[in-house]
Image (cartoon, rainbow, N blue to C red):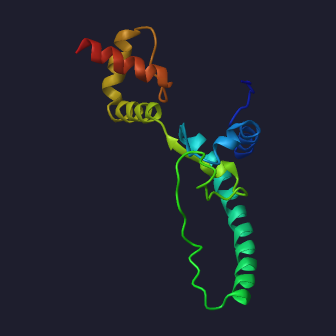
Amino acid sequence: MDFVELSLKSKDDFDAAFDIMLSTNLSEYLKHFLLPQPGDWPAQFYSRQVIYETLQKYNKYTEASSALQSQQQSTSAAAHSDHSYTLSYHSGPDKENATVNSDQPAILSLMPRIGPLHISLNGQETLFHKFRDLFEIIYTKLFPKSKLSKTPKPWRISLSLIRESVRA
C-alpha cells in the first residue's frame, strides 16, 4: 500500500490519481469486476470526465477495428448470419467463458457514485439552510460569545443538528 498526496481539485489531479491506482494489480481485477467509487460531487464530476473521455477514445478505436473486421467478414462469408453484437456476461475471472475485450481500459470498470456519507451530509446541509434562523438561535445559545457565519463549516452544522436532537 502506498500513500500519495494529491489535491484532487481538478480533472488532471483525478487523471493522475487513476494512473497511480491503475499501475497496481487493481487493473487486473477491473478486467473482471466493476468497482463502485463513492465520493462527493467534485469527485464524481472529475472522475466521470476522465472515464467518459477514455470511453470516447475507446469507442473510436473499437469502431475503426470493427469496421475493418466487418469488411473482412463480408468478403469471406456473405450469406452467414452474424450476431457478434451480442455479449455473454460472466461473473468472476473464469478464463474459459470470458468474453471481455482485453484491450478495454480498466478505468471503464469504475462506477463513480455518491456515497451514503455524502448523501447524509447533503441532507444535513439542506435541512440547515432551510431552517437557518432556528439553528442560528440554537448556535448562539450553545456558543454565546460567537456568531454563526453565513456559510458554516459542515462540522458546525452537524454540531447544531446533534445538539438539537439531544435536547429533544
80 or 67: nearer the eye?
A: 80
Residue that sits furthest to the left in the current view: 168
Residue 32 to residue 149: above or below: below
Q: Which residue is located at x 25 percent, y 12 percent?
A: 167
In which quarter of the view is residue 64 placed? bottom right
Residue at screen point 73% across, 44% down: 15
> Image quarter for residue 97?
bottom right
Q: Position of residue 84 (x, y in %)?
A: 60, 73
| Residue 165, above or below 132 | above
**Left or right of residue 148: residue 110:** right
Image quarter in which the C terminus is found: top left
Between 141 and 90, which is closer to the camera in this rendering?
Answer: 90
> For this rendering, which residue is in front, 8 or 57?
57
Q: Give whichever of 121, 95 is nearer the camera.
A: 95
In x, y percent, where is residue 106?
Answer: 68, 49
For image coordinates 59% across by 48% down, the residue present is 94
Residue 133 horizontal/vertical position (percent):
33, 27
Q: Position of residue 38 (x, y in %)?
A: 53, 37
| Extreme residue toward the bottom, this view | 79
Quadrant placement of the N terminus: top right
> In which image quadrant can residue 128 be found?
top left
Check the image and name the residue furthest to the front: 96
